[in-house]
Amino acid sequence: MGTTLHSASPELLLPDWDPRRARRAQVEAGLREAIRGGRLAPGARLPSSRALAAQLGVSRRLVVDAYGQLGAEGYLIARRGSGTVVASHAGEPGAGARPEPPAPVPTPVDGIDLFPGAPDLSLFPRRAWERALRKALAELPDARLSYGELAGTTELRVALAAYLGRSRAADADPGRIVVTSGYQQGLRVFCQLLRARGGSRVAVEDPGYPIAGWTIESERLEVVPVAIDDDGIDVEALQETAPDAVVVTPAHSLPLGAVMAPDRRRRLVAWARESGALVLEDDYDAELRYDRGPAGTLQGLAPDVVVLAGTVSKTLAPALRIGWIVVPAELTPLAVTARASADGGGRRIEERALAELIESGAFDRHLRAARQRYRVKRAALLEAIAAALPDRGVRGVAAGLHAVLELPTGVEEAAVVAGAAEAGVHVHGLGAFTRAHRQPPGLVLGYGLASERELREAVAAIAAAVRERG
Ligand SMILES: Cc1ncc(COP(=O)(O)O)c(C=O)c1O
């Protein structure tokens, strides 16, 4: 029997407490499920935080935090004076259905590398990976070393469904997951799904991830750059350009470091449903948030129109080339065919090892340690900037592997980049990520690869370049 809630809203049943999971996460998951499953309909009023806390026997703070989290994800809206209500586009039909060039490219460089896409490769959990790989080799029967499992290794799809549900509030089941060779292949498969539906125009955040634009173009689709600001993609501008699909990074954008605001999440989903457009959610670095838990996925809010794409390139290493997409049920067969026709399927042994890493808890342990390291590195970077360039702002939330340093107006980004390079510091300007929507001058500082000492040296070199060339 679960814990039953009675309120002005429909009866709400939260499952029994699971002693292994934090209560706040359970309250959040229970509410999400109730909204997705339609038990809490759009517009329904939730109990006050005080009432719900009393009924569940938890602190009011916990309920306030849980409502806040679901608000950030776009499920709930807090209305002054009238309490918290379910957002109008959450949990609509399909949302709960569960059927079975001159831009940043990752090249190793001499000197200090501030490439924003790379994680700290010295953190790669070699021992745990080795154990997982040995286990995979020992346990995979000969028959499973053949062709097959075209959607990806079964154990990995099972492990990912559970992981994405619990850690990313995604609506995932193994039958709708396709394992890919990194995010990049997931994007390619997405493009093919779109072409099969007759689509031809894909909107991208501008500035954004340059490789996404190139990949879309190489799939013979038109790229439509849409402005992004500190609240995520400009949904009104998106609607005006009327593309067939859009690629977004709601948890943390590259390069601006924006988190998509709740009202934009809701409007994006509403637009996609009304216009029949597909959304690709690039969740590339969502696990890396340092000041609070990351916002849950957009896909969890609207699994009928959002394809969720993930990767281990930021959490483990790009060299593994393992990613995944979670696809609406009716598109899954086509996604499997598209993926398999590219290269015959994935790497069974490594995928099985990744499943083991996730299920053994080693992946979570690694993530906790990695977050701790990046928190320290980011703090070192910000401290160095505050000391060397005290009047300069930094854009982006405390997340991921990059931050944007704002340069003084009128300064030539390219001149500062060149000056830093002469001092052995390799950094990219915002211009390298921009197609049409020019930004004020700024540098994208990746802190994954560099040590704290190198970050301090790099900032000193950049500050010198700003003084000399600015
Ligand atoms: C915005 C964004 N998405 C995705 C990726 C990861 O792609 P992949 O899994 O293909 O390595 C990156 C890597 O830099 C990125 O910056």
Image: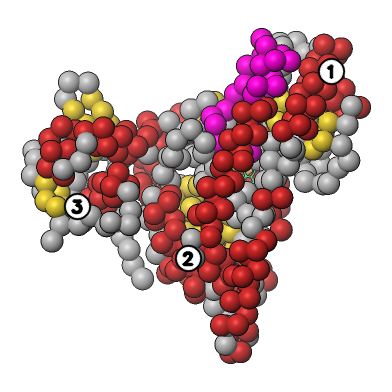
389 in the magenta segment: yes
Instruction: Residue lying at the far bottom in this picture: please name it.
Output: 143
Amino acid under label 2? Glu
Q: Are marks 1 and 3 in contact (CB under 8 Å)?
A: no
Percent of width and height locating residue 266: 36, 37
Q: Position of residue 237 (x, y in %)?
A: 50, 29
| Residue indicated by mark 1 | 465
Reading the chain from its start, which is encountered first: label 1 or label 3? 3
| Residue 158 in the image: above or below residue 113 | below
Residue numbers of the magenta segment = 382-406
- Nearer to us of marks 1 and 2 is 2
Circle on res. 279 = none
Task: Judge whether residue 73 is colored magenta.
Answer: no
Distance between the alpha carbons at the discs numbered 1 and 3: 58 Å
Task: Specify whether residue 49 is in view.
Answer: yes
Kindly identify the residue that appears in the image at 11 percent across and 51 percent down: 4
Please tell me which of labels 2 and 3 falls first in the chain. Answer: 3
- Helix, strand or loop at label 2? It is helix
